[in-house]
Amino acid sequence: MRFPVDTTGWAGDPVEIEVFTTRVDTIFGATCVLLAPEHTLVDRFADGATDPEAFRGRVQRFRAQDRNDRLTGAVEKEGFDTGRTAVNPFTGRPVPVWIANFVLAEYGTGAVMAVPAHDQRDFEFARKYGLPVEVVIQPETDAGAGPLHGSTMEAAYAGPGTLVHSGEFTGRSTDGAAAFMARAAASRDVGRPKVQFRLKDWGISRQRYWGTPIPIIHCDACGLQPVPYEDLPVELPTVAEFTGLGDSPLAQIPEFVNTVCPSCQGPARRETDTMDTFVDSSWYFYRYCDASNDEQAFDPEKVRYWAPIDFYIGGVEHAILHLIYSRFLCRVFKDLGMVDHDEPFTRLLTQGMVLRDGTVMSKSKGNVVDPDQMIASYGADTLRLYEMFVAPPEKELEWTDSGLEGSFRFLTRVWRLVIALCPVVAGAAQDGLGTMTLDDAHRALRRKTHESIRRVSTDLGPRAHLNTAVSALMELVNDLYAFCERHALAPHTGTARQGTPADQVPPETRAVLGEAIEALVLMLSPFTPHLCEELWERLGHAGGLVTVAWPTFDTEVARADEIVVPVQVNGKLRARLTVPADVSEEDLRTAALTESSVQTHTAGKTVARVVVVRRRLVNIVVT
RNA sequence: GCGAGAGUGGCGGAACUGGCAGACGCGCCGGAUUUAGGAUCCGGUAGCCGAAAGGCUGUGGGGGUUCAAAUCCCCCCUUUCGCACCA
């Protein structure tokens, strides 16, 4: 909206103040216009003031207020009357023009129309300086509250309602009124609709040495000239003195600064500002695809092969700026035809921060845990395992020392188990497993092994839930201990029990255990590589773990022959049935209905419905 | 104020598409072993009632949908993070 200023007695052209508003529908209540202290018209107002020096002094005081305090509202809202008026284009009435310290020069036009009745900041400002408060929106008052009145209001009303005292617009609902009035303003040529984006400037030039040079040459005759393509890249000189004064350190190096204009061949100067490092960090992942290319940033063919990035992991502190910049540059590269995807990262995981005593660990708070100390006490494997186990990666992590102890305990448990079983399983023939006849305990252990492989593989892969993967491994180890206990095998060496000598252990036991132990070591190795390399070697394998394939599972082996199905009566758990895994719906229903504790709960009642979910549950609805 | 998450035992956390709430670990309790302690191994551990069998309650609060809700819908509370005098 444009508010023409009464310039009576002023030299120069007529002046209009442009304001930006999202609430044109309240314009009939605009009783004042406020300018930011930095507004370009402020100087002209000062020139035309009765005491220009005093005027400038007050403006200067506002401008000197801490910028950050002004932005966050930490300073008191203050202002002063310029002594001039401007005409409200809708009411035709003159309104005073003030300068106010809370108006932001960088947002909108740096000037606002103040509507005290319907904007809280304007309201407070008007009350402080005795400016009129004129209600132009009345809320729907079916709740019995009376109509709003400017002199009795205690706060601005910013909600919906009906326009009043608004000329030809009176009676209109606020719903749609702003858009309608914006069009009216356009047709009267006093304003126009505008989309205002809240984007911040992305300043990229810094007075630093350690940034990418900006490939521009300043020539007095030809102006700004880009460095010719064949001269790229501009390389930083290897020596630069850091004086901490004035320009970039590069400006102190004549050999770097002085050059020749590519256009007129006359003397010229290189740009000495450098790009901020986040420019590089916004597209490094493309360069990584083709890092030794000295012809171009990267070969689009190679990037097409590797990118977009499947899985991008970073800390939360990078979750905002770095990602926005990277996406910006991705779009730039797309427009240049250098990449053919819209987004640089297919999947993003932002890892949580480590907390201690409820607050983020930080050097300034002095509440950090020293990893070196923990590695000295427990080893790097323990620390890694604990961090993976204690919470899913995207969650913040509350540090506890006892939890670390638990991970250490688990690893010593694995160590003792594998070492004790080495003589039993090393060199055991596992190929025959498919044809061997196994008893229930052996089959159960095999099933656990294969089910663990399935769980860990999916947890590590698509789900990226490292903590549940560790849980699955802990369960496998627990089952292995139980199996050993039952078969009088080590590692129960802490007890009086004697392990069976290796050569007396039946071949099927050795095979089943061997399969389980090797899968365990392989699956644990991403978490605790040092320990697992050692164990792998002791199991009789040479060559290291990196060359060994991830274990695979057999769905048939992982499948249980018997399953436990819960039986509910009216949604409450009343029994558990152990049935064959391939039980038919009909058999399951019959088994559920005839189960004794189910019958006590259905006795004397009518079975209205039986919900049977195969392999999952039976729910009997009685009335 | 706006936006995005989160809320489950004493604690960290599980629960994949609505289908047995509390996997796994910590802590705690009991047992075995041990001169003792520690370590180790085995068992128990949501709350309430009960000697037990068992019963009732329970995923921040209140409603709703459903045979069935931690999970879906509506309202509210608390909390974390980001943005914020943005007109």
Image (cartoon, coloured by chain):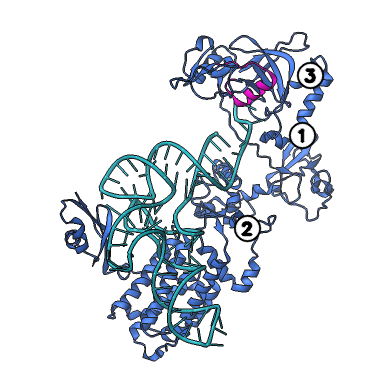
Chain colours: A blue, B cyan
Q: Label 1, label 3: how many angstroms apart (C-alpha)?
A: 39 Å
CB under 8 Å between discs 1 and 2: no
Residues behind callouts 1 and 3 on a single chain: yes
Q: Is residue B49 left or right of residue A596?
A: right
Kindly tell me whether residue A568 is visible in this rendering: yes
Q: Which residue is mark 2?
A: A292
Q: Position of residue A511 (x, y in %)?
A: 36, 81
> Do circles 1 and 2 both sit on a common chain?
yes
Chain-order first, disc 1 or disc 2 = 1
- Above or below, comparing residue A138 to residue A348 in the picture: above
- The CA distance from mark 3 to mark 2 is 60 Å
* Res A464 visible: no
Residue that badge 3 annotates: A46
Give the amino acid type for the residue marked by disc 3 in the picture.
Answer: Ala
- Give the alpha-carbon distance from disc 1 to disc 2, as whole Å: 35 Å
Same chain for labels 3 and 2? Say yes or no. Answer: yes
Q: Which residue is mark 1?
A: A222
* Mark before the other along the chain sequence, 3 or 2: 3
A131 in magenta: yes
Residue closest to the eye, A313 or A134: A134
